[in-house]
Amino acid sequence: HSGQSRSHRTMSDGASAATTYRVKAPAYLKITAHAVKYALRPVCGVLLGREESGDVVVEDAIPLFHNYPLGPMLELALMQVDEFSKEAKTEIVGCYWANELADDMSVHRIAKRIGTQIVKFFKNAGILVVNNETLGKAVEGTISAFTPTNEGKCVVSISDSESLEKRISGKQLAEIPIVDFDEHLANVKLDWLHQKVV
């Protein structure tokens, strides 16, 4: 084992100039574990990271909702994540969304709205959409990236995909303790911001 990061890349035709979103293991695990925990519900969250050599490095994900969020709740959650990201010395670089129907890979209007808000502060913000049909089966193809403005497809590169393959069976993803902002509102003792998964 060389210790080098292995990546899978997916790209749509003609997207060579598109932004690449390099998703690190903690972010990948949180996104997919959140989608598995609420498999029959829409889930969403925000992505934290930074820009590096023109790519967007997604270092962490903060789970927000497992329903269609109302405007005031969404604003409240985003304000708290913004404060957290400043403390963590990262930026909000996009959002993620998993639709409630397994075969639905569309960019939901709420995801577009969140992404459009983030673009005002981070120009290369992306929306990562979870493919529910491959969840827990493979790392490659589980996440697609889009731009909030025109839904153009971007490039996704999953870091450490080889080691992640060993951790992503549906049962293992379901065992990752994920708390989202929704759950925090129901029980304020639950910490939704500081969650370690690796």
Image (cartoon, rainbow, N blue to C red):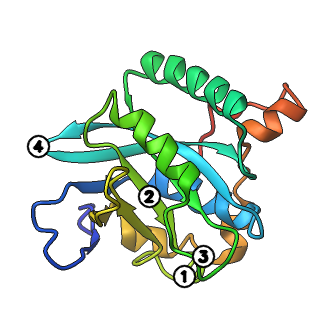
Classify the position of the N terminus by image quarter. bottom left
* Secondary structure state at the residue bearing disc 1: loop
Q: Reply above or below: 188 against 21.
A: above
What is the x, y in percent for residue 19?
Answer: 20, 54
Q: Name the residue under label 1.
A: 134
* Secondary structure state at the residue bearing disc 2: strand
Q: In this view, does 61 lie to the left or right of 188?
A: left
Q: Which amino acid does label 3 sit on?
A: Asn
| Disc 2 and disc 4 in contact, CB within 8 angstroms | no
Packing grade of label 2 (10 A; few <14, some 14-19, many >=20) is many
Q: How far apart are marks 3 and 4 (CA)?
A: 31 Å
Q: Mark 2 points at which residue?
A: 128
Residue at 53% across, 21% down: 84
Which mark sits nearer the N-terminus, 2 or 4? 4
**Quadrant hosting residue 133:** bottom right
Packing grade of label 1 (10 A; few <14, some 14-19, many >=20) is some
Q: Reply above or below: 185 against 125.
A: above
* Secondary structure state at the residue bearing disc 4: loop
Q: Mark 3 points at which residue?
A: 132
Q: Name the residue under label 4.
A: 53
Which mark sits nearer the N-terminus, 3 or 4? 4
Q: What residue type is labelled 4?
A: Ser
Which mark sits nearer the N-terminus, 2 or 1? 2
Q: How far apart are marks 2 and 4 (CA)?
A: 20 Å
Front residue of 169 and 51 = 51
Q: Distance between the residues labelled 3 and 1?
A: 6 Å
Q: What residue type is labelled 1?
A: Thr
Q: Distance between the residues labelled 1 and 4?
A: 30 Å
In the rendered structure, find residue 188 and report the number of the disc placed on it.
Answer: none
Mark 2 vs mark 4, foreground winner is 2
